[in-house]
Image (tube, helix red, strand yellow):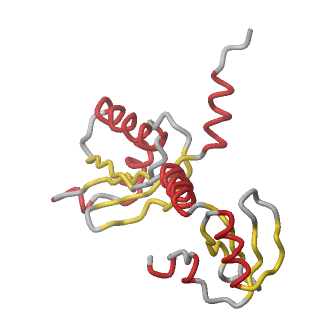
Amino acid sequence: MATDRIRINNEIHAPELRVLGAEGENLGVLSLEAALAAAKTAGKDLIEISPSAVPPVAKIMDYGKFEYERSKKEKVAKAKVKVSETKEVQIKVGTGDNDMILKAKKAAEWLAEGHRVRAELFLKGRYKGMSEEFLKTRLEKFLTHIPYAYKIAEPITRSPKGFAGVIERDLIAQAKREKEQQPTL
């Protein structure tokens, strides 16, 4: 955050600045002293907006108002950021169809929220010795129960606990699916 510090008035070091007036008008390239004098006559602060530009850009405005607008923009940007997690759903070889459907509905909710879902077939004891084809088809059967369009992010592979695959939502396929399900009048 130290590099994000905005310089105002006497903290500005550049000998020349491109200055914007209080109403947004371009005052042109001025010396630092002339820019500070213009800000003082306007009763406002000289704020360095773009220090990396050549020459640096400064604006004449009230610093409190500038900080308020900047914090508002940051809050809006922060609110738009969507946090996506990888949720996990675990089934076993003996999981019944109704339980699979319930877990598939939960996975669909997570996909709709934008999360990735890691589907895992948990194996213990003698189930670890079963044929890999059968176990993969068991996990694929679970994936077919999910009522939301998805694409495979990571294919089904052997994991430490059994078999696992990661899916994520497919917005285009979901939009098509919803369009097809709408009743035509």
12 up-or-down from 79: above or below: below
178 up-or-down from 52: above or below: above
Q: Taking 5 as reference, is 139 left or right? A: left
35 up-or-down from 45: above or below: below
Determine the residue located farthest toward the front in the rendered image.
41
Q: Nearer the viewer, residue 148 or 65?
A: 65
Q: Nearer the viewer, residue 136 or 120?
A: 120
Determine the residue located farthest toward the top in the rendered image.
185
Where is residue 118? Give x, y as percent.
Answer: 39, 54
Q: Nearer the viewer, residue 135 or 3?
A: 3
Q: Nearer the viewer, residue 86 or 69?
A: 69
Q: Taking 131 as reference, is 116 left or right? A: right
Where is residue 12? Give x, y as percent.
Answer: 60, 84
Query: Which residue sits at x=61%, y=89%?
Result: 13
| Quarter of the rendering occupied by the C terminus | top right
Query: Which residue sits at x=56%, y=55%?
Result: 69
| Quarter of the rendering occupied by the N terminus | bottom left
Query: Which residue sits at x=36%, y=66%?
Result: 158
Where is residue 106? Give x, y as percent.
Answer: 36, 37
Determine the residue located farthest toward the left in the rendered image.
125
For the image, the number of numbered tags is 0
Query: Which residue sits at x=51%, y=37%?
Result: 148
Q: Taking 46 as reference, is 119 left or right? A: left
Where is residue 123? Give x, y as percent.
Answer: 24, 57
The image quarter containing residue 136 is bottom left
